[in-house]
Amino acid sequence: DQQVKQNSPSLSVQEGRISILNCDYTNSMFDYFLWYKKYPAEGPTFLISISSIKDKNEDGRFTVFLNKSAKHLSLHIVPSQPGDSAVYFCAARSSDSNYQLIWGAGTKLIIKP
Amino acid sequence: EAGVAQSPRYKIIEKRQSVAFWCNPISGHATLYWYQQILGQGPKLLIQFQNNGVVDDSQLPKDRFSAERLKGVDSTLKIQPAKLEDSAVYLCASSLVNSGYTFGSGTRLTVV
């Protein structure tokens, strides 16, 4: 039972263009969503998050959009840079789950020069 | 602020051998997590500690995996005996209550 799904295992984007990474979830009790970035041989690092009471959160080149009715969130990176090449994980949390995160399988983003 | 420290970084063992991983969380972080990440999948929670007490170990294969957190600080995760399917990256993370996680660099285990 995959509660958090990232259906694209990989995505290739030209440098300077917009990267859009998608994430779908099934549990309507999720109230907080996070994106993590992972380079090879390193642990995931926190990138950006959004509470379920919002529909958008922006931090520099990174924006996360949340569509609660569709149970869908997306991460936009604009403009994409070579250093953005990494695996991006979507994660979600519900307030009744000991603050544990439920993770997607990740999307590998490749930024082409 | 020092990050989450894990050791070793890499480990190769034969099946049926035992192995142990060590984690030192960020100072003051009460919550500590051990995750297993298999290639192509998201991290899977194995065990969650709050100080030195276990909050959730429902996904820990207790016939072969064990974990402890001494004095609510450092933690060790042990596998005995290891199976081929245990090959994965083992990630430790820590957090304050109700805050974001900080992950260590992980231990890549290969069982041959």
Image (cartoon, rainbow, N blue to C red):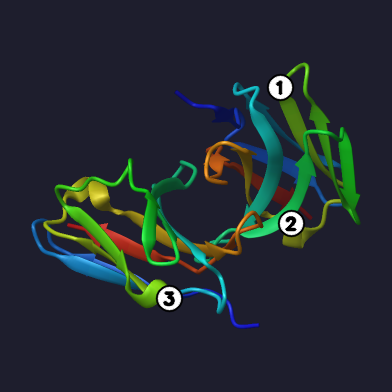
Where in the figure is residue A96, as x and y percent of width and height? 57, 36
Q: Which mark is residue A71?
A: 1
As shown in the figure, which amino acid type bears the numbered disc 2?
Answer: Asp
Which chain is indicated by disc 3? B
Between circles 1 and 2, the one closer to the viewer is 1
Nearer to the camera, A66 or B29: B29
**Which residue is located at x 71 percent, y 22 percent?**
A71
Visible residue check, residue A34: yes
Q: Please identify the residue farthest to the top as the structure is shown.
A: A69
Q: Which badge, 1 or 2, comes first in the chain's sequence?
A: 1
Q: Which mark is residue B73?
A: 3
Q: Quadrant of the N terminus of chain B?
A: bottom right
Where in the figure is residue B30, as x and y percent of width and height? 52, 67
As shown in the figure, which amino acid type bears the numbered disc 1?
Answer: Lys
Residue A19 is left or right of residue A43, and the answer is right
Between circles 1 and 3, the one closer to the viewer is 3
Between circles 2 and 3, the one closer to the viewer is 3
Give the residue number, with chain letter if any, for mark 2: A84
Using the numbered discs, state the Cα–Cα distance from disc 1 to disc 2 in whole angstroms: 26 Å
Using the numbered discs, state the Cα–Cα distance from disc 1 to disc 3 in whole angstroms: 37 Å
